[in-house]
Amino acid sequence: MIGPEIPDLEREAIRLADRLRVLGPRWAARAHAPDADVIGAVREALQRLADLAADAARTPRREVPRLALHALADQALVLAREAARAGATDAAYETLVGLRRRL
């Protein structure tokens, strides 16, 4: 099978963003130690998306800003779309699916 089409990547990014829109505010509202691991995984996946886009576009990698937890959904959408535009569709799709399954 050839990799996922960009509409599949977009659909997966939207699914993940919908999940993060629910979880982000919940994480911000409570101090629950196990949440820190999951939040860390989200931030690692966001960085991976940014790195995939930079590598595919042959531009320098940049550190993803640590935005507030309620902004993670929008950050995921933007970074997934950047990866798609750069041509890193397959790896970005796998990153999104893996993260969504972890949540």
Image (tube, rainbow, N blue to C red):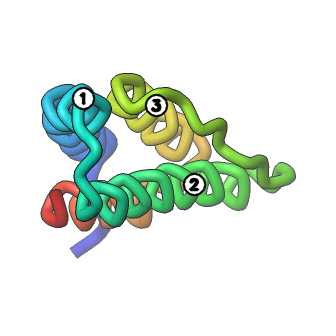
Seen at 23% across and 37% down, the residue is: 30
Please tell me whether mark 1 or mark 3 is closer to you in this view: 1
- Which numbered disc, 1 or 3, marks the residue that appears first in the sequence? 1
| Discs 1, 3 touching: Cβ within 8 Å | no
Depicted 19 relative to depicted 83: above or below? above
Question: Which quarter shows the N terminus?
Answer: bottom left
Which of the pair 17/71 is nearer the observer?
Answer: 71
Q: Position of residue 43 (x, y in %)?
A: 47, 52
Give residue 27's quadrant in the image. top left
Q: Is residue 49 left or right of residue 17?
A: right
Seen at 28% across and 60% down, the residue is: 33
Tag 3 residue? 75
Outermost residue, right direction? 60
Please tell me whether mark 2 or mark 1 is closer to you in this view: 1
| Discs 2, 1 touching: Cβ within 8 Å | no
Tag 2 residue? 47
Q: Amino acid at mark 2?
A: Gln
Q: Position of residue 95 (x, y in %)?
A: 36, 62
Tag 1 residue? 29
Which of the pair 15/7 is nearer the observer?
Answer: 15
Which of the pair 58/20 is nearer the observer?
Answer: 20
Depicted 30 relative to depicted 89: above or below? above
- Alpha carbon distance from label 2 to label 1: 24 Å
- Which numbered disc, 2 or 1, marks the residue that appears first in the sequence? 1
Residue 66 in view (yes/no): yes
Q: Amino acid at mark 1?
A: Ala
| Discs 2, 3 touching: Cβ within 8 Å | no
